[in-house]
Amino acid sequence: MTGIRLKPHPTCGWGRYPVVTSVVQRARWLDDLRLSLDRQATLAQGQLRSYGDAGLAPSVVSTLELNRILHFEPDTGVLEIEAGITLDQILRFVVPRGWFLPVTPGTKHPTIGGCVAADVHGKNHHVDGSLVSHVEALTLVTAEGDTIRCDRSDYADLFWSCFGGMGLTGFVYSVRMQLLAIASDQIGVVTRRTRDLEETCDILKSTQTQHRYSVAWLDVLHRRRRGRGLVMLGDHTQGASMKAHGARTIRFPAVGPRLFARPVMQAGNAAYYRRQLRRLHHSKVHYDPYFYPLDGLRDWNRAYGRPGFLQYQFVVPFAGGLDCIRAFLDRICNTTTCTLAVLKTFGDGQTGPLGFPQRGWTLALDFCQTPKSISTLQDATSLITDAGGRLYLAKDAIMRAEHFADMYPRAGEFLAAKRRYDPGKRLRSALSDRLGIT
């Protein structure tokens, strides 16, 4: 075990809210994960790219030094890596060899262990499902100190509970997964400008079988045409280039909430919407700006200042989902300012008992963290539960326990697996305590 930081220090997720005082141990080898249990660690921690308190606990074990590639088959694209390796590190290794991540979230900086915990999805869920659809096996250390290799046949309940389980089922050591073959580092992008929310949703839904990737940026602050936006449809293309990195990043200054005043955001949204003069535009770009547009702004979360920000992401079924989104936006946008809105679709892919994806619309919204924004979102959450939807645990910082019980009907299945592999209830986090999971 290396680098035990005995003095507690404040830690936070990417949203910089809330803050929890933690003691951090650092694991370099598999045995270190077992030793951390003796030192009372209750959660494995990666890059802290979950937005709220899912990665926070009073005593944690950092997996960032568990960042080795254990096995790679260049002909088949099967890769096994340790849990602390980041998606960026994986991409730098596999892209020059003609492979890509089968599923990637909107940033390349999380660890693969964190991606398992959240069962991350990307712009291609309607085609390829979430991460669990591409993982063959996991190796993890349970709360009892046992090392278990699990897959869909052996210890299947543990395997499925890890995906979306937010690290509460064990310390993941390694992940064996199937990569996606590509012919270049380029993405062919079709960008369509839309007039309103209905047209945005219609394009996303009607193009599901035509493109591997799809995502829409929304202007939710426009009074008359709320939900107008830019739909970006993408596919891997042929080419000679296989570079695993895009443009250089710039450091974002700590500006504070004044940057996100409503008139400023309305003007910024209008400028971004009008940057595309034609309603239809074709382009070819490196994968970096398409999949990870905000990674070009290093530490962009600092822009919100000391209070931090909230990302509120929900999914609702297609049936009645558009009406729910419209009602939700009408309620929240009249009282608080949304700083970013991104809409995608989910398909029929499987996930774990606490996994987030379900067939329907998923909308991610950013807000400055204030008492008013918290109370507004909490009050509006009933619209999501009434529509049969749920919030994303990896983004959540404010959900109430009663809402969690309504949103996750398979929670009992998860708790049964947790009792089996963590009978002493040792593994817990600030999120699991807040929601009554632990």
Image: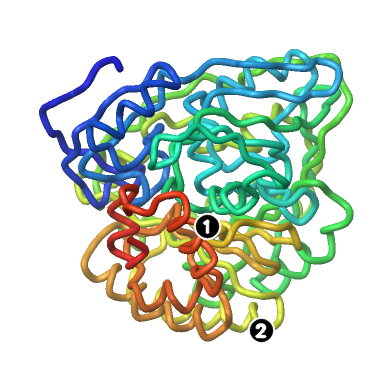
Q: Badge 1: how crowded within 10 Å, few (<14), some, or many (20+)?
A: some
Left or right of 89 on screen, residue 7: left
Coloured how? Answer: rainbow
Q: Position of residue 388 (x, y in %)?
A: 58, 80
Give the distance between the C-alpha atoms of the residues marked 1 and 2, in whole angstroms. Answer: 29 Å
Q: Which residue is mark 1?
A: 270
The image quadrant that residue 197 belongs to is: bottom right
**Residue at point 31% right, 57% down?**
368
Along the line of sight, the residue nearer the viewer: 61 or 89: 61
Amino acid carrying label 2: it is: Gly
Residue 320 is tagged as: 2
Left or right of 422 on screen, residue 181: right
Which quadrant would the C terminus be assigned to in this image? bottom left
* Above or below, 341 relative to 324: above
**Residue at point 13% right, 33% down?**
8
**Residue at point 28% right, 36% down?**
60
Left or right of 2 on screen, residue 218: right
Which quadrant would the N terminus be assigned to in this image? top left
Q: Position of residue 75 (x, y in %)?
A: 86, 17
* Above or below, 55 relative to 34: below
**Residue at point 64% right, 56% down?**
351
Along the line of sight, the residue nearer the viewer: 174 or 235: 174
